[in-house]
Image (tube, rainbow, N blue to C red):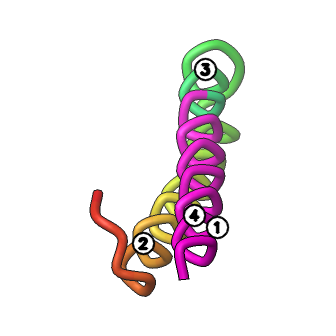
Amino acid sequence: MGSLIQRNTAVAKRKGTLAVAAGVGSAVVLVAVSPVLGVVGLAGAAYLGWDWLRFRMKHGLRL
C-alpha cells in the first residue's frame, strides 16, 4: 500500500509542477509577446491546475 501512496504523490507532484510551469510560461507570454496567446495559455494552465487538484482530491492527498 505504501508504494501506491508514493506513486500517487509522485504523480500529483508532476501534475502540479506542470501546471505551475504552464502558468508561469503563459504569464511571460502574456506580458512579453502577445496578450491573446497568453490568455489562451492561462486557460490551459487553469485546466492543468484543476486536473492536479481533482487528482489530489480523488486520491485523498492533502494539499
Res 61 → quadrant? bottom left
Amino acid carrying mark 2 in the image: Arg
Amino acid carrying mark 4 in the image: Gln
**Residue at the farthest front position:** 2
| Secondary element at tag 3 | helix
* Circle 2 or circle 3, nearest the eye: 2
Label 4 to label 2: alpha-carbon separation = 13 Å
- Residue at 65% x, 51% y: name it: 14
* Circle 3 or circle 1, nearest the eye: 1
Amino acid carrying mark 1 in the image: Arg
Residue at label 2? 56
Amino acid carrying mark 3 in the image: Val
Is residue 46 positioned above or below 24 on the image?
below
4 and 2 marks in contact (CB < 8 Å): no
Label 1 to label 2: alpha-carbon separation = 12 Å
2 and 3 marks in contact (CB < 8 Å): no
Label 4 to label 3: alpha-carbon separation = 33 Å
Labels 4 and 2: the sequence-earlier one:
4
Q: Residue 20: say if magenta.
A: yes
Q: How many marks?
A: 4
> Which residue range is magenta in the image?
1-24
Q: Nearer the viewer, residue 16 or 39?
A: 16
Residue at label 1? 7
Residue at label 4? 6
Label 2 to label 3: alpha-carbon separation = 27 Å
- Residue at 68% x, 27% y: name it: 34
